[in-house]
């Protein structure tokens, strides 16, 4: 069988606001880090311990626009996507390799209190195939109702 599966499912909290990059060709990408944690009982001390892993997430096109508008540091987010390994050269000319999760679906489950973007809580599944809602499209400040 020649089929394979590359599927990642994460549920965690954003470690920082997304970094958004717009390209000359009209493309857009959002990058953010997501923390996931697991708890376990330390067999030596009998204490409950927690391990946190950090995951680098990238979202392209419509998902990046959604991320730009609704994701904030501390938000609880469900992410489905695939692992992608890429290599590049840093500013010093050193070769670097990173493994990222390329988001295909995002669900914002909650945001920290006081961190309220211009849109209402967005709890439906947003995927690469989802049309970006008009409420998330950048509007001129003169058209805002406040």
Image (cartoon, grey):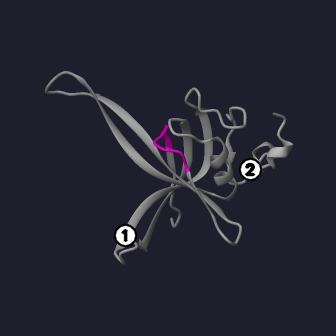
Q: In this view, does 58 lie to the left or right of 140?
A: left
In the rendered image, which residue does mark 1 sit on? 96
Q: Relative to 46, is 108 above or below?
A: below
Q: In this view, does 62 lie to the left or right of 104?
A: right
Whole-percent x, y for residue 122 in the image = 69, 35
Residue ID at (72%, 37%): 119
User: Residue 14: within the magenta?
Assistant: yes
User: Residue 127: within the magenta?
Assistant: no
Label 2 packing within 10 angstroms: few (<14), some (14-19), many (20+): few
Q: Nearer the viewer, residue 20 or 140?
A: 140
Residue bounds of the magenta highlight: 10-18
Query: Which of the two discs, 2 and 1, sits closer to the camera?
Result: 1
Residue ID at (67%, 59%): 61
In the rendered image, which residue does mark 2 sit on? 130
Q: Relative to 53, is 64 above or below?
A: below
Whole-percent x, y for residue 18 in the image = 55, 49
The quarter of the displayed image where residue 72 is located:
top right
């Amino acid at each position: 069988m020649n089929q394979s599966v590359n599927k990642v499912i994460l549920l965690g909290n954003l470690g920082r606001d997304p970094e958004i990059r717009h390209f000359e060709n009209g493309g857009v990408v959002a990058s953010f880090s997501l923390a996931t944690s697991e708890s376990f009982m330390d067999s030596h001390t009998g204490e409950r311990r927690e391990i946190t892993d950090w995951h680098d997430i990238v979202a392209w096109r419509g998902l990046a626009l959604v991320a730009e508008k609704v994701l904030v540091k501390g938000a609880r987010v469900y992410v489905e996507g695939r692992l992608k390994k890429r290599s590049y050269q840093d500013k010093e000319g050193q070769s670097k390799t990173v493994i990222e999760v390329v988001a295909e679906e995002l669900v914002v489950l909650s945001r920290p209190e006081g961190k309220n973007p211009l849109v209402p809580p967005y709890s439906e599944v947003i995927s690469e195939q989802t049309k970006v809602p008009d409420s998330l499209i950048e509007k001129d400040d003169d058209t805002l109702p406040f």
